[in-house]
Amino acid sequence: MTEANETKEQLQMPTTYDPKEAERKWYDYWIKNEFFKAGNRPDAQTYTIVIPPPNVTGMLHIGHALDFTLQDILVRTKRMQGFDTLWLPGSDHAGIATQTKVEQKLREDGQTRYDLGREKFLEKVWEWKEQYANTIREQWAKMGFSLDYSRERFTLDEGLSQAVREVFVSLYEKGLIYRGNYIINWDPAARTALSDIEVEYKEVQGALYHLSYQTADGTDSIVVATTRPETMLGDTAVAVHPKDERYKHLIGKTLLLPIVNREIPIIADDYVEKEFGSGAVKITPAHDPNDFEVGKRHDLPQILVMDETGTMNANAGPYQGLDRFECRKRIVADLKEQGVLIKIEEHVHQVGHSERSGAVIEPYLSTQWFVKMQPLAEKAIDAQKSGNGVNFVPDRFEKIYLNWIENVRDWCISRQLWWGHRIPAWHCADCGQITVTREDATVCSHCQSTNLNQDNDVLDTWFSSALWPFSTLGWPNEEAEDLKRFYPTNVLVTGYDIIYFWVSRMIFTGLEFTKQNPFKDVLMHGLVRDSEGRKMSKSLGNGVDPLEVIEKYGADAMRYMISTSSTPGQDLRFRWERVEQARNFANKIWNASRFALMNLEGVAASDIDLTGQLGTADRWILHRLNETVREVTRLIDSYEFGETGRVLYNFIWDDLCDWYIEFSKLSLYGADAAAKKQTQSVLAYVLDQTQRLIHPFMPFISEEIWQHLPHEGETITLAAWPQENAAFESPDAVREMELLMDAIRSVRNIRAEVNVPMSKKVELLVKPATSESLSILRNNEEYLKRFCNTSLLQIDADMAAPEKAMTSIITGAELFLPLAGLIDIAQELARLDKELQSLHGEVERIEKKLGNEGFVAKAPAKVIEEEKAKLADYADKRDKVIARLAELKG
């Protein structure tokens, strides 16, 4: 493209910005040219983020949009800062969640997974996975995420499967994985075990049933209480505290279990609280985790009374075949009829529910695979407490992490599913032993039999997810190029709600298998709630589809709103009006850029020349750009995206658009060719730098504008991040502009107050308070004439205040607008009275603060000096208002 054609195209920048056209065009361009591909800067420092893999269970929601947008902001910034960036995409097979979805779909066709068989069912799940993985990729593209698709991974792909098997076998060989009977959380709907953190506890209105158990000899009785009377059929003892005088004479005797009339012993155990209830507790080792431990200490039988579906089994006697909740009703009626049920109390308690199926969890004795957590947790705890751990942002989450990992229980890792990593263990039908191996076993390692069957269970989804930061980069091949170059990763961005599920597990597996923390920082963001602060859910119908937001307002508006509403660790509220404001901000940027382009005449950012005579506004905007670059860079590095948004908004909307561009028109439309060229070069430079600063937040519109600007390079995504320039520092220009802007604002406020339109010229008399103010105002008369629209401008330090005029006191000057033809004296007196009351209040407030000994003792000297300066300023303004009132009343 020739320079002439390029300039012509720039000048044809459309009147309005079309998000749909720009988003489609630029994402295709970025992907086609592989701008997001890592490894193109072999000598540069690396910056790595592995995406928290979304589940292939459906569409991405607004929470994903927040999580991924924050990552994209970090990655785009670091890419522009010259890092060799890798943002690795991927998705999670999501075990029980995905299998449940596919089974629901089969039920609609009148089928179950058992009708299909394991292999055919898994084919169906893989079809589901491909469909939703493609959908997720399309959503990533629509949101503008700069992912390296050449490295995309899936938790069930071949490489990750190898990593999972290596970890399982290695932990098994170290004695850290074992198989045994234990009380686990059982989901009767999904028919699978769940880990503790896959259980949601909900407050439920239930009942407490008080039952009387008679001694076998008929001489005495003990009252026990339960919320689950159906489990009493599995009772194998009643426990009392060994020092409870009420029951000492009964310890060692037996009771008759009602309904089934089985004898059970009365035992003594410190687990029982004497003061709670009757001081006697029924022990059901197969259906309660605490009872299970008591039962082991006393060698009690473990009697399961229901099957995997929550249906009562043969051990339930007359209730066999009943659903557990139907059994509860029947057994309560029978106990009441037999006189065993003493009373029923209303009882509000926490009941565990499956996070996936919603079913009430059943504590259930089952043979499962477990990870022995204590040795793994100790390494993670030692690393964190020695200062070699992960940096949590905000840091309060470190305590939450440590509290969980210091009290962690062994992890139940087996799931009774078909979709997932099948456990690499083979059971020998001849000797009954288990062979665990990295390769599929064909011969029993104990008796050499070939009569082997692989374990039917699969691993908990979080087992493979725990390896995500290093398995995705080539581990267990420790010589893998990506592993050596991009691991450990720099930051994990995730919601605080999965600190136990995922974050902690990645840390201890990373330390165990790579001897390093998997990431340097963990940035915890909150949940996206609706405008009323409620959690988004299908039942409330208050969820937000990010694609709907994009369709209505564009991807940049959604990204900017959701990221700049975010504070680390805090929930945020989604408000449509804020998305609209973000869209308006994008339009403001577009319109300002379009105006600039029409007036640049081919001048580029690189043409900026600081050797010439820059005007006040030119020097000021470069100084403000410097401050903005410094703050935006610092805030992004600190993960303070909300504050970053505020800084960018203030600079772009207020400083650049509302002030500088307006001021620039004097030079752009003036007769001074040199001044015009200087302003054009400053405008081109600031506009270029502004697009770079906003690019991580609004990638599409910034690329569209940048491509219209005269520029070097293929894309803004690879353009250099703005740097501070000492030559731009100009505190003098700041003081000058603040005085000018104060004066202009004051005149406009007076006009608004007395309803004088800006189109009507006014007389403006200015009395500078200092020689510096006098010099500033006289050197910049043209700005005052233009933006105050004066018929007469007089600047004089010795002028006497006119008798009848609107007055404004600003720092450094007094402004007078003669009243002739504008307002009456009474109205001006009322206004000054109101201003005086306000100034009295400010003076009194600061005097009170400075008179507070506690404040003066604790506040830094700089803060005290600033307060004293404010007091002097307010007092000076107050005195001048008092004098003006006296003049008008005189």
Image (cartoon, rainbow, N blue to C red):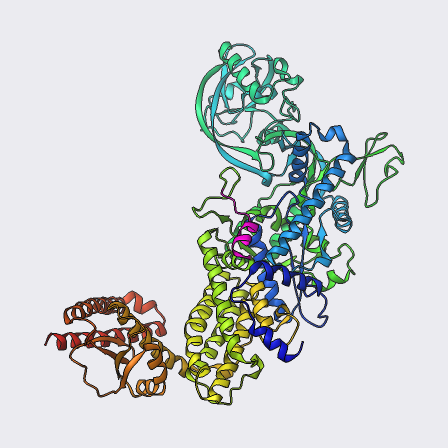
Q: How far across and down, in percent of the image, does residue 403 sit?
A: 54, 48
Foreground of the two, 830 or 69: 830
Q: Is residue 44 left or right of residue 263?
A: right
**Image height of 33 relative to 365, above or below:** below
- Asked which quadrant contains residue 845, the reply is bottom left
Q: Quadrant of the N terminus?
A: bottom right
Q: What's drawn in magenta, residue-wise? A: 542-554
Q: Residue furthest left?
A: 890
> Picture coordinates of residue 664 (x, y %)?
44, 79
Residue 2 % position (x, y): 66, 78
Q: Is residue 450 magenta?
A: no
* Vertical arrangement, residue 870 with respect to residue 439, above or below: below
Asked if the magenta segment contains residue 546, the reply would be: yes
Q: Nearer the viewer, residue 176 or 581?
A: 581
| Quarter of the figure that contains the C terminus | bottom left
Location of residue 760 by image quarter: bottom left
Is residue 86 visible in the rendered image? The answer is no
Camera-nearest residue between 304 and 774: 774
Question: Does residue 423 appear in this view?
Answer: yes
Q: Quadrant of residue 387?
A: bottom right
- Is 256 left, or right, of 308 in this rendering? left
Please name the predominant secondary structure of the magenta segment in the image: helix
Q: At 61% from the left edge and 51% from the top edge, which residue is drawn?
A: 503
For the image shown, how many numbered marks are present on the structure?
0
Residue 654 or residue 728, whichever sits in front: 654
Residue 715 pos. (x, y %): 64, 70
